[in-house]
Every structure is written in structure tokens, then in C-alpha cells.
Amino acid sequence: MNAEQSQDVQFRLTKAEKLCQSYRVKLTPLRKTLLQLLYENKAPLTAYELLRLLRKFYPKIEAMSVYRILSFLEKYHLIHRVLSCHAYAACNIPEHQHHPQLLLCEKCNHSEEIETESLKQAMDDISTKYAFFASKKPIEIFGICQACAIKP
């Protein structure tokens, strides 16, 4: 990770801490470490991948603790569950509740959260037209990212 990426991770962690303070909850060192791992990885990570990475810092951590932390972070909109691959990705827009729109690269597993009003509007239109009220509205779009597309 270069200096710019490291600075971005620190900025996002500070923002997450402030958001937790506004909710009157704590971003404990363990929660912060897990969130940092998600910020540092561009690909979504499963709970067991996170467990393996966390054990470098917390050797005795158990899977159940990881699931509890993930539940906490998801509840406070700091991460998104990526349903298609049973994994988790950091939220790029934690300041407000929204339905995640994720671009997922089929080659490198990179994920990018986007927020476009047109996709949100299309989902709302579908809900209205078919009288179907979705409880979850994640949009996961699979394809090839720009970096992979230009590789020979």
C-alpha cells in the first residue's frame, strides 16, 4: 500500500470513528482493525478470510467474534454484505443509509461502490410497477474493471 492509500485508509477510519460517536457506540480496536482490513482490500472478504487476517493481530479470536463485529459494522452502515459471494466490502458512503450499488470485477475480484440516482430510481419504479416492496436492494453488477480490461 502506498502513502496515498494509507492516508485514505486513515481518513476513512477517522470518519468511521466520528460516525460511531454520533451513534453513541464504540469503534473498539478490534472493530477498527477489521474495518481497516476491509478498507485496505479492494476485493470483498469472507468472514473466514477476515478471521485469518485478524489472527495476525488477535491470535485467539474466534469466528463468532468476527460475525458479531461484521453484524455491528453492517448495522451502522460501515460495511455492505456482498450477497453473491457471501463476503463483505467497506461502505464508501457511510454518512447516509442507502442501498449499495457494487461493481464487481470477475477477474481480480475488485469491488467498487457507486451511487447513481438512475439505478435507485429504476429500482423504485420496478417496486411501484410490480407492487413489490424489496426488503433489501443491493445491486451487484459483474464485469471487468478498467485495470483488467487493459491488461494483455
Image (cartoon, grey):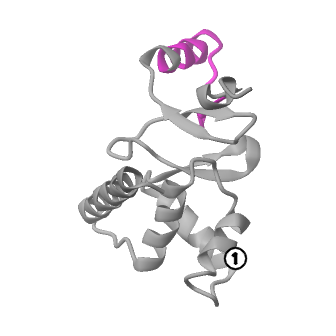
Quarter placement of the C terminus: top right
Whether residue 139 is visible, yes or no, is: no
Q: Specify whether 64 is left or right of 19.
A: right
Q: Specify whether 15 is left or right of 149.
A: left
Q: Mark 1 points at which residue?
A: 63
85 drawn magenta: no
Residue at 25 percent of width and 60 percent of height: 18
- Specify the segment rendered in magenta: 120-141
136 drawn magenta: yes
Coordinates of residue 42 in the picture (x, y in percent): 57, 47
Coordinates of residue 106 in the picture (x, y in percent): 75, 34
Residue at 69 percent of width and 28 percent of height: 151
| Residue in the foreground of this view, choosing between 70 and 89 | 89
Residue at 51 percent of width and 36 percent of height: 113
Rendered image quadrant of residue 117: top left
Q: In this view, does 11 lie above or below 135?
A: below
Coordinates of residue 8 in the picture (x, y in percent): 35, 51
Graded by Cα atoms within 10 Å as few (under 14), some (14 to 19) or many (20 or more), the crowding at tag 1 reads some
Label 1, secondary structure: give it: helix
For the image, the number of numbered tags is: 1
Coordinates of residue 143 in the picture (x, y in percent): 70, 25
Whether residue 59 is visible, yes or no, is: yes
Q: In this view, does 4 lie above or below 57?
A: above
Residue type for callout 1: Ala
